[in-house]
Image (tube, helix red, strand yellow):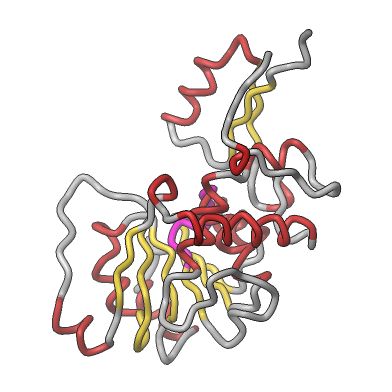
């Protein structure tokens, strides 16, 4: 089978990377990189140490983008807090490298996050902006940024005065329409993180893999639609 794509989209994998890892990156890792590089004073391209002294909150730390955001933020030197919905997902977020994990279904998650980041968090990687808007405002620090990469079914309502007082920013992220320069920077940074061993897959790395043969592609789609935690991969084989 032959496939023709633009050369910029045919990114070589570092020699230490498995095909499973390569198949699990793409959009999630580029999305995570963009979310981590749109704040005040943020670097254009992540590298070790460039987020040192900053605190990153990753909403949905057990998801694919959340997993990549945790690993990239840690690689860049940030302190990482992840929110999850239960103990199983808490284990995955911790395995990905989150320094702290907060179950948003228990107690007062805003108070829990504020106890870990008394001055507020600098960057929020947000998967559910309409649901988490109030929480995000409650924990965001001065000149902080909320980078939202997914949308809900409801309109987003924000308290303008509170965000204005913080000089805060809401940034919306969609990889397909990110300008070429930051997208190229993301590709370079993700490749460097892979080479450093900072991006991983598998249960022990906090990103379970669910494999399906090519003839069960419909089942793979059903697994995605049902909210499978981790990455769904299709083995296409090595035919003629």
**The N terminus sits in image quarter:** top right
Q: Is residue 191 left or right of residue 106?
A: right
- In the depicted structure, whether residue 13 falls above or below residue 86: above
Q: Nearer the viewer, residue 182 or 237?
A: 182
Quarter of the figure that contains the C terminus: top right
Residue 23 painted magenta: no
- Residue that extends furthest to the front in the rendered view of this protein: 7
Left or right of 144: which side holds 130? left
**Residue nearer the viewer, 61 or 147:** 147
Q: Position of residue 59 (x, y in %)?
A: 43, 61
Above or below 56: residue 91: above
Residue drawn 21% across and 89% down? 165
Between residues 95 and 47, which one lies in front from this camera angle? Answer: 47
Tell me where residue 164 sits by quadrant. bottom left
The image position of residue 229, as x and y in percent, is: 53, 41
The image position of residue 86, as x and y in percent, is: 48, 55
**Magenta extent:** 58-64
In the image, what residue occupies the spot 43% across and 81% down? 121
Q: Is 65 placed above or below 74 here?
A: above
Residue at 42% of width from left, 45% of height from top?
Answer: 176
The quarter of the displayed image where residue 136 is located: bottom left
Q: Is residue 8 left or right of residue 103?
A: right
């Amino acid at each position: 089978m032959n496939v023709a794509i633009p050369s910029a989209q045919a990114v070589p994998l570092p020699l230490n990377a498995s095909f499973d890892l390569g198949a699990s990156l793409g959009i999630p890792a580029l999305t995570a990189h963009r979310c981590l590089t749109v704040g005040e004073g943020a670097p254009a391209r992540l590298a070790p140490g460039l987020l040192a002294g900053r605190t990153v909150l990753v909403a949905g730390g057990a998801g694919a983008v959340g997993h990549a955001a945790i690993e990239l933020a840690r690689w860049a030197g940030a302190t990482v807090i992840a929110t999850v919905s239960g103990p199983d997902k808490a284990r995955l977020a911790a395995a990905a490298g989150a320094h702290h994990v907060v179950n948003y279904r228990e107690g007062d998650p805003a108070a829990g996050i504020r106890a870990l980041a008394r001055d507020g968090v600098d960057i929020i990687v947000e998967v559910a902006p309409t649901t988490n808007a109030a929480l995000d405002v409650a924990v965001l620090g001065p000149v902080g940024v909320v980078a939202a990469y997914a949308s809900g079914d409801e309109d987003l309502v924000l308290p303008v005065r509170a965000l204005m007082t913080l000089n805060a920013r809401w940034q919306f992220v969609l990889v397909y329409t990110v300008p070429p320069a930051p997208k190229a920077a993301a590709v370079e940074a993700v490749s460097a993180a892979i080479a450093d061993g900072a991006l991983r897959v598998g249960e022990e790395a906090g990103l379970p893999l669910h494999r399906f043969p090519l003839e069960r592609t419909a089942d793979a789609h059903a697994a995605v639609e049902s909210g499978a935690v981790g990455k769904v991969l299709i083995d296409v084989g090595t035919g003629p």
